[in-house]
Image: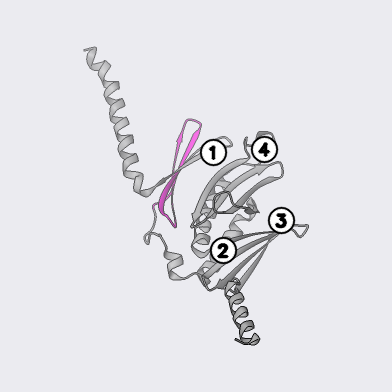
Amino acid sequence: MSDRESGDDQGQAQRQLMPPPEEELATKVLQIQSKRFYLDVKQNRRGRFIKVAEVGPAGRKSRLLLAMSTALELRDHLTSFSEIYASLGPPNPDNLPEDGKLKSEVMIKENRRYYLDLKENSRGRFLRISQTIARGGPRSQVAVPAQGMIEFRDALTDLLEEFGTEDDMSYGRFKGELPEARHMRIENKNFYFDIGQNSRGIYMRISEVKSNFRTAITIPEKSWGRFRDIFSEYVEKLKELSDKPAEEGK
C-alpha cells in the first residue's frame, strides 16, 4: 500500500470519528432584561434539535440542547409555569420560600434529565432550566427571568411549528379539546385543577394556594379512576361513621 493510500485511509477513519456536521436552519434572539437568549434550530445526521444559549451581561455563555420532542414538552411546561407566576402576588423579600423554589418539574429524555425550577430570591423570580447527561454527569443551565417566560415560550412555539415534524408535534398528544381548568375555595385556601398534556400524556395538576405559599401534585390520566375510587371510599366510610352514632342513639 502506498503512503498516499495509507494517508487516505487514515483521513477517512478520522472523518468517521468526527461528530457529524451541523446545519443551522433558523435562529431567534430574545433580549430579556439584561440577558440575551439565542434559540437555534440545527440539524445533523441524527435529526433536528434546538440549542438554547444564554449570554449574560459579562458575555458568559450557558447552553442547553433539546430534542424537538423535548422542546415541545418544555413549551407545555412554560405555559403552566407562566400561569403560576401570574397568580403570585408581588415579591416579598421578607417572606421568601425556604429553598427558594415555587414550583419544580423534571423531564427525562433518553440519557438526559432536565430540571425546571421556578425560584425566587432577593433579586426576583426566575425559571432555572438545568440539563444533565446521564446520572451524576455535568450540569449545564440557563436562567430565564420570570417576566420573559411567555416570550421565551412563544419563540419556542414558532420554531416548533415551522421546523418540527408531524411526529414531533403529535408525539403523545391528545387530539381533542382538554377540559377547562376548575377552581375551588375552602376557607382561606384556594385549590386549582388544571388539565394539561406533555409527551408522556394527559395529566391533572392540583394546586393548593394559601397566601404566598403554593404546593401542587401531578396525577397522570391513567390514575384518575383509582384516585376517584379512593376518594369515593373515604366519602362513603366517613358518611357511615357519621350516621352510626345517630342510629345508636335511637
Could you tell which of marks 3 and 1 lies nearer the N-terminus?
3
* Residue stretch in magenta: 179-205
Mark pair 4, 3: CA separation = 20 Å
- Seen at 30% across and 38% down, the residue is 229
Kind of residue at badge 4 = Asn
Kind of residue at badge 1 = Arg
Neighbours of disc 2 within 10 Å: few (<14), some (14-19), many (20+): many
109 to 190, vertically: above or below: below
Q: Position of residue 11 (x, y in %)?
A: 62, 79
- For the residue pair 156 and 248, the one nearer the viewer reads as 156
Q: Position of residue 62 (x, y in %)?
A: 68, 58
Mark pair 3, 2: CA separation = 18 Å
- For the residue pair 238 and 18, the one nearer the viewer reads as 18
Could you tell which of marks 3 and 2 lies nearer the N-terminus?
3
Residue of label 2:
156
Say whether residue 40 is left or right of residue 244: right
Mark pair 2, 4: CA separation = 31 Å
Could you tell which of marks 1 and 4 lies nearer the N-terminus?
4
Which secondary structure lies at badge 2? helix
87 to 48, vertically: above or below: above
Closer to the eye: label 2 or 4 = 2
Residue of label 4:
92
Neighbours of disc 3 within 10 Å: few (<14), some (14-19), many (20+): few
